[in-house]
Image (cartoon, rainbow, N blue to C red):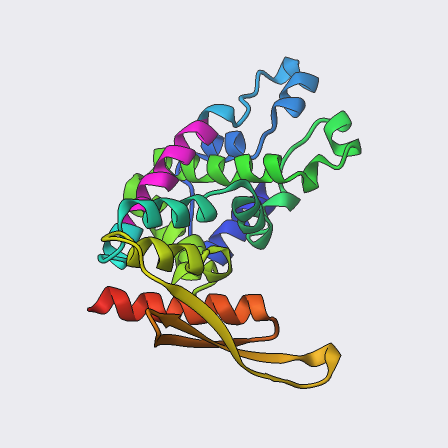
Amino acid sequence: MEDLKNMIQTQFNVSFRNDSLLEEAFTHSSYVNEHRQLQLKHNERVEYLGDAVLEVVVSEFLFHHYPEWNEGKLTRLRAQIVCEPSLAAFAKECSFDQFIRLGKGEERMNGRKRPALLCDLFEAFIGALFLDQGMPAAKDFIYRVVLSKIKEDAFSHAMDYKTLLQEELQKDGDIQIKYQTVLEEGPSHAKHFEVAVFVNGDVLGRGSGTSKKSAEQNAAQMALNKSLKK
């Protein structure tokens, strides 16, 4: 586990006080089952704790970062952030997949690449860090690895801004929303589109993209931002 400790120290400036917690976080149940004589602990319990810590920290951040958003919007974005594919990607970005201890059978079945396993591993690390050093350390790690991506707008692709705009504008009654392509140029393999979104006949937002769908989403995002600032 020395290589793992060195990596975490170098990459995240984190030094575990209790190495057994770190070992537990990176030990899969398949490994424990194949090494019963060692009386090891697998990471399912700390994964359970890490899941709760992650949800609290992300929820608090979104609550303060998007003060104008209602519960539905906050819940949808949180679901995109803490979903299995996202957390598995974070685990790989952190190189955690290289250090998880797996049983031979799980290794043969490419368990090291399984999104569900990597998702659990990422949450297990957070749970172990929380137990070892408390909420401040866990929050610092989550802010660095996860929440920095929100600030970079890395999850914007996961947001259905057309639906969000419709919900926002129609909360007080029916309203007419229309998307119109105002520009289409470029060769077939490199098209560029510009779309305007009309609300009751007036332009509320414009957006561009390499497809009509992406341009419409960008237009809806601009319109949503305008409507929320009113």
- Does the magenta run of residues contain 164? no
Q: Residue 80: percent from the left, percent from the top?
A: 47, 48
| Residue 199 figure quarter | bottom left
Quadrant showing the C terminus: bottom left
Whether residue 13 is visible to the viewer of this picture, yes or no, is no
Name the residue located 26 percent from the left edge and 51 percent from the top edge: 171
Q: Quick check: 136 left or right of 146?
A: left
Dividing the picture into quarters, in which one does residue 107 lie? top right
Name the residue nearer the viewer: 150 or 99.
150
78 or 73, which is in the foreground?
Answer: 73
Position of 137 with respect to 217 (left or right) is: left
Q: Give the farthest residue toward the left.
A: 230
For the N terminus, the image quarter is top right
Predominant secondary structure, magenta span: helix
Identify the residue at horizontal 61%, vertical 80% (top origin). 192
Considering only vertical position in the picture, is 228 above or below 110? below
**Nearest to the observer: residue 47 or residue 23:** 47
Front in this rendered view, residue 82 or 68 = 68
Q: Is residue 53 magenta?
A: yes
State the extent of the magenta-drawn residues as a range. 46-61
- Residue 4 position in % (x across, y down): 57, 45
Q: Residue furthest top?
A: 37
Q: Residue at x 62, y 40 (%)?
A: 115
